[in-house]
Image: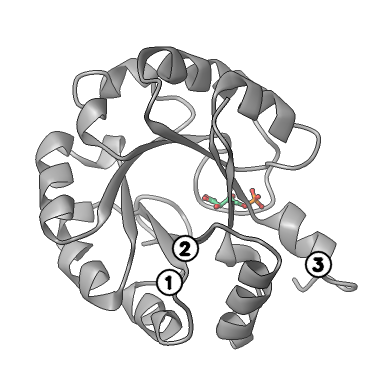
Amino acid sequence: MLQAKIAPSMLSSDFSCLAEEAKRMVDAGADYLHMDVMDGHFVPNLTLGAPIVKSLRKHTDAFLDCHLMVSDPAKWVEDFAKAGASQYVFHHEAMENPSKLIDTIHAAGMRAGVALKPGTPASVVFEYANKADQILVMTVEPGFGGQSFMMGCVSKVKELRDRFPQLDIQVDGGLDLNNIGEVAAAGANVIVAGTSIFSSCYACYPE
Ligand SMILES: O=C(CO)[C@H](O)[C@H](O)COP(=O)(O)O
């Protein structure tokens, strides 16, 4: 089994002190900082963009794992590369030619990842997964933190791990101590957790 990396989702942090929140997560052992980028169109929520990543980059050397839940992911590659993003993860469902976008992301100096909504089968990435650095299997419908984990998505992790033994497979959504064992056993090696990590670190969890 591959050693799992932990990626706290900064969506669950207190945005008014993002740099301190990031430091707190890194000091607690975070491997990545997961940045949820939502455009209010691909998903029904609006969060952050490249200017926030750029500001945070001035305060941390951490691996900034940017998950683009946006309708036009090709449009923002350069901005995120300039902002200091380490990895650029876009949705298969948003692209007609995902393979080409992987090349563009690599040329911009970032790692490239491809995300799948719960309803999208793993087989859609089989053709080009070897070019990607990571496949992200969403275990909630993208758009909001704090949702319940969808156990039905775990079989996709196993399917991908069986075909691509060396690939990073990330899971995101509703992860906590009740289900992390299950996804790790299926082959996930990058675990995103928002609500569970941040709520356990606050005496009083912010809204
Ligand atoms: O991508 C996301 C939402 O679309 C978040 O990263 C994800 O939901 C993590 O938060 P939680 O652990 O609270 O589910």
Q: Residue at x 61, y 87 (%)?
A: 16
Q: Amino acid at mark 3?
A: Cys
Q: Amino acid at mark 1?
A: Leu
- Helix, strand or loop under label 2: strand
Q: Is residue 25 above or below residue 31?
A: below
**Residue shown at the point (26%, 69%) measured from the top left:** 80
Pointer 2: residues within 10 angstroms few (<14), some, or many (20+)? many
Tell me the crowding category of disc 3: few under 14, some 14 to 19, or many 20 or more residues within 10 angstroms, Cα based: few
Q: Is residue 136 above or below residue 202?
A: above
Q: What's the residue at 38%, 27% (across, down)?
A: 166
- Pointer 3 residue: 201
Residue 93 location (% of width, % of height): 29, 35
46 horizontally vs 108: left or right: right
For label 1, the SS is loop
Q: Give the camera-side residue of 44 and 80.
A: 80
- Residue pointed to by mark 1: 48
The first of marks 1 and 3 along the sequence is 1
Label 2 vs label 1, nearer the camera: 2
Residue topped by disc 2? 35
